């Protein structure tokens, strides 16, 4: 069965990868032949993705991700696929056109929401610098330098965490010095090892940049387009609006929206979705087989990915929370989903045609 990872973030938003080349080298080394770029608010990486895939005989899928708001769900206090914010809903687009065809009002809306997202992080950077000064640190963060050195145009709060870690490293002569910096910045000793880059960045983010943290800045409502508007942008870009399921968490719980699977499927259909996806490491094999199988039987395109949108580097070959590999059943579901997305990208109609163009590319 052809291995697929249909949801990967790159440095064009935020990623564990230093560049597109590293991501695709890893995919090739792990035998993952179909790979989907899926950055927040950005199609800027598509050219690099396509060219890099061609060099390695990989098949490229073109995606995008948004955070939207459904006012009806918000008013009802319904948690959808953000477990902490009722109404806030992540939406992906799958199988977008490349070369990019987005223009007019939809292109302006995408540019505006990306600009607002960047502006929110800039406000956060200013608060973080004020906090650093208040606790007696001699250094500060340069937002312009963060944008030029650490990003490809889309700036996420995780970039601030990376920048702060790098600043602490640059201003420390030893590990004890780093620990002293973090104790001043956090107001207590760091829980993570000071040389564990991924863990310390996650701690910076949770302690300082999230709600209750010294540098937290609430997101402006302008940063969240209505769900229907996001769907319209994705369709104008040639893509398939896709609902990302959270599935079961570590305690076996589901969000309000996803707990009743039949009701969720019916609601998604009414809202115009015909594609869903899962980030497989979030879920047990049993739950993923149950949800993915049910949704495919209901007529949805089902695809899987890993995201890689944190500092932690994980394998590209997919696995579930309780297994080191996907089951044969899940691999088959994932590949059929990839074939459907590939066919859509190419203007074809059937899974069989998608299979053919994938196999012609990777052989």
Image: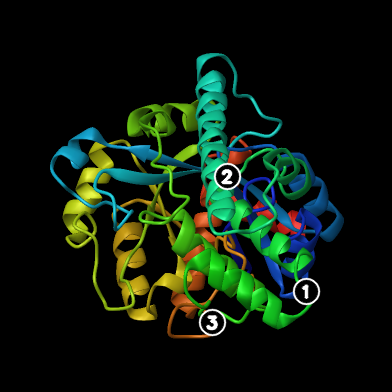
Name the one closer to the observer, 164 or 29. 164
Farthest residue, direction bottom:
323
Reading the image, the residue beneath label 2 is 125
Who's the residue at 74% across and 48% down the image?
49
Reading the image, the residue beneath label 1 is 29
Who's the residue at 36% across and 65% down the image?
292
Name the one closer to the observer, 71 or 92. 71
| Residue 272, percent from left and from top | 32, 36
Farthest residue, direction left:
76
- Left or right: 204, with 70 as reference point: right
Q: Could you tell me if the residues under marks 1 and 3 are in contact, i.e. CB atoms within 8 Å?
A: no
Q: Residues within 10 Å of mark 2 (few under 14, many from 20)?
A: many
Reading the image, the residue beneath label 3 is 325
Q: Residues within 10 Å of mark 1 (few under 14, many from 20)?
A: few
Q: Is residue 357 above or below residue 201?
A: above
Q: Secondary structure at mark 1?
A: helix
Which of the two labelled residues, at mark 1 and mark 3, occupies the earlier sequence position?
1
Which of the two labelled residues, at mark 3 and mark 2, occupies the earlier sequence position?
2
- How many dots with numbers? 3
Q: Name the front one of labels 2 and 1.
A: 2
């Amino acid at each position: 069965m052809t291995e697929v990872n249909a949801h990967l973030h790159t440095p064009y938003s935020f990623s564990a990868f230093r560049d597109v080349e590293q991501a695709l080298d890893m995919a090739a080394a792990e035998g993952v032949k179909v790979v989907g770029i899926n950055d927040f608010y950005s199609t800027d990486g598509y050219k690099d993705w396509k060219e890099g895939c061609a060099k390695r005989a990989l098949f490229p899928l073109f995606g995008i991700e948004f955070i939207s708001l459904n006012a009806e769900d918000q008013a009802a206090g319904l948690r959808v696929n953000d477990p902490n914010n009722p109404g806030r809903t992540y939406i992906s687009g799958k199988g977008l056109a490349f070369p990019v065809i987005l223009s007019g009002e939809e292109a302006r809306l995408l540019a505006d929401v990306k600009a607002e997202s960047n502006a929110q992080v800039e406000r956060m950077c200013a608060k973080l610098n004020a906090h650093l000064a208040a606790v007696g640190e001699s250094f500060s963060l340069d937002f312009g330098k963060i944008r030029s050195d650490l990003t490809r145009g889309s700036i996420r709060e995780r970039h601030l965490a990376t920048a702060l870690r790098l600043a602490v490293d640059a201003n420390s002569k030893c590990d004890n010095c780093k620990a002293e910096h973090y104790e001043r910045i956090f107001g207590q000793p760091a829980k993570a090892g000071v040389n564990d880059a991924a863990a310390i960045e996650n701690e910076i983010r949770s302690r300082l940049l999230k709600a209750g943290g010294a540098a937290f800045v609430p997101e402006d409502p302008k940063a969240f387009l209505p769900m229907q508007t996001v769907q319209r942008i994705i369709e104008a870009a040639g893509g398939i609006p896709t609902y990302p399921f959270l599935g079961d968490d570590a305690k076996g719980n589901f969000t309000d929206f996803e707990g009743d699977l039949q009701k969720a499927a019916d609601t998604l259909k009414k809202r115009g979705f015909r594609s869903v996806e899962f980030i497989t490491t979030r879920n047990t094999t049993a739950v993923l087989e149950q949800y993915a199988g049910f949704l495919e039987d209901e007529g949805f395109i089902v695809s899987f990915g890993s995201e890689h949108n944190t500092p932690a580097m994980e394998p590209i070959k997919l696995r579930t929370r309780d297994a080191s590999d996907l089951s044969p059943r899940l691999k088959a579901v994932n590949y059929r989903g990839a074939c459907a997305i590939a066919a859509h990208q190419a203007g074809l109609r059937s899974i069989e045609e998608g299979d053919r163009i994938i196999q012609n590319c990777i052989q």
